[in-house]
Amino acid sequence: MQLEHYISDLLYRYECVTVPNFGAFLSQRVPATVHETTNAFYPPKKSLAFNEQIQTNDGLLVSYIADVEKIPFEAASLKIEKRVKSLKSCLTQGETLAFKNIGDLKLNTEGKIEFSPSYHLNYLTDAFGLAQYTSPKISREVYKEEVETIENVVPITVSQEKRKARPYFKYAAIALIALTITGFGASKYYVDGVAAHNEIAQEEANLALDNEVQEATFVISNPLPAIKLNVTKQSGNYHLVAGAYRVEANSDKKVEQLIAEGFKARKIGVNQYGLHQVAYNSFANRDEAMKALNTIRQNSNRDAWLLVKKLD
């Protein structure tokens, strides 16, 4: 009987799998880790351990074997008991028990069972499909290191002998300073002259513009007659709504249509749903508004409704 195969199956679902009269295999969740030296990322997993002190039969392993092999519970218990005797005999003879995908078991000098877990299989189902990943090391301040390397290899120094051998460096530096001062003075003089010239030109342009404005003002000797427009402003908080439109162009067409029919139609804004509302008319008195609404519903639009709202 491949006892380790059944133990491995149960370790995916349970944290403790007890082999009666032998010991218990324990699992514990371990979070993801990063190796500082190799920069390897390890996914979360279940770490395995073995406790020789836990030997009481909890029925988990026996029931699982009985269910898989389709045998009675007692028969499964006898098979496990027989296998445990064989395992203990091998350990007593100094052999190492290799449980595939679980770990190795052997006796130490004190006669206790030592367990070395296997890392070939991850029993944490939440980490299924996650594998180890090694990231390249991140290098910082590379350019600074390269500059320091160049400075160490090719140092820039001026020896005392070279200063003596080339005295004209001193005279060249003096000449350069003199030319710089002279150029700065000339540049400042030129800039000041340009600024003064620009200021004079700006004043002349402003004077010419004022003259032209005055001439244009006095050319109009006969002013045009004033035009009076009579505009009727619609007011009131009671609006007879003809419809609401998602596209503003459709609301404009509706306003033109209602005006052609003799209504004082207009757009009264956008509602909370983003629709452009069109009203037949607006009234300051509720009774007048209801009377007009009833007329519209009877003659042209049953869906017309009254909106009570103060418009800005």
Image (cartoon, grey):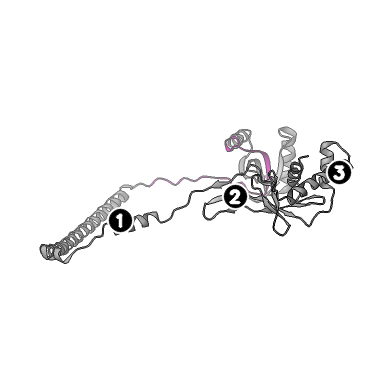
**Looking at the rendered structure, which numbered label has been put on residue 150?**
1
Looking at the rendered image, the disc whose residue lies closer to the viewer, 3 or 1, is 3
- Alpha carbon of mark 2 to alpha carbon of mark 3: how far? 41 Å
Magenta residues: mostly which secondary structure? loop
Residue 161 higher or lower than 145, as above or below: below
Q: x%, y% of residue 99?
A: 71, 45
As helix, strand or loop, the secondary structure at mark 3 comes to: helix
As helix, strand or loop, the secondary structure at mark 2 comes to: strand
Q: Earlier in the sequence, mark 1 or mark 2?
A: 2
Identify which residue is drawn at 22% across, 59% down. Answer: 195
Looking at the rendered image, the disc whose residue lies closer to the viewer, 2 or 3, is 3
Instruction: Name the residue that disc number 3 marks.
Output: 78
Residue 227 colored in magenta in the image: yes
Q: x%, y% of residue 108?
A: 69, 56
Relative to the observer, which residue lies in front, 165 or 173?
165
Q: x%, y% of residue 264?
A: 62, 40
Which quarter of the figure is the N terminus placed in?
A: top right
Relative to the observer, which residue lies in front, 255 or 1?
1
Direction from residue 197 to residue 31 in the image, left or right = right
**Looking at the rendered structure, which numbered label has been put on residue 15?**
none
- Alpha carbon of mark 3 to alpha carbon of mark 1: how far? 78 Å
Instruction: Name the residue that disc number 2 marks.
Output: 42
Q: State the count of labels.
A: 3
Q: Quadrant of residue 269?
A: top right
- Alpha carbon of mark 1 to alpha carbon of mark 2: how far? 40 Å
As helix, strand or loop, the secondary structure at mark 1 comes to: helix
Task: Give, as a three-letter code, the residue at label 2.
Answer: Tyr
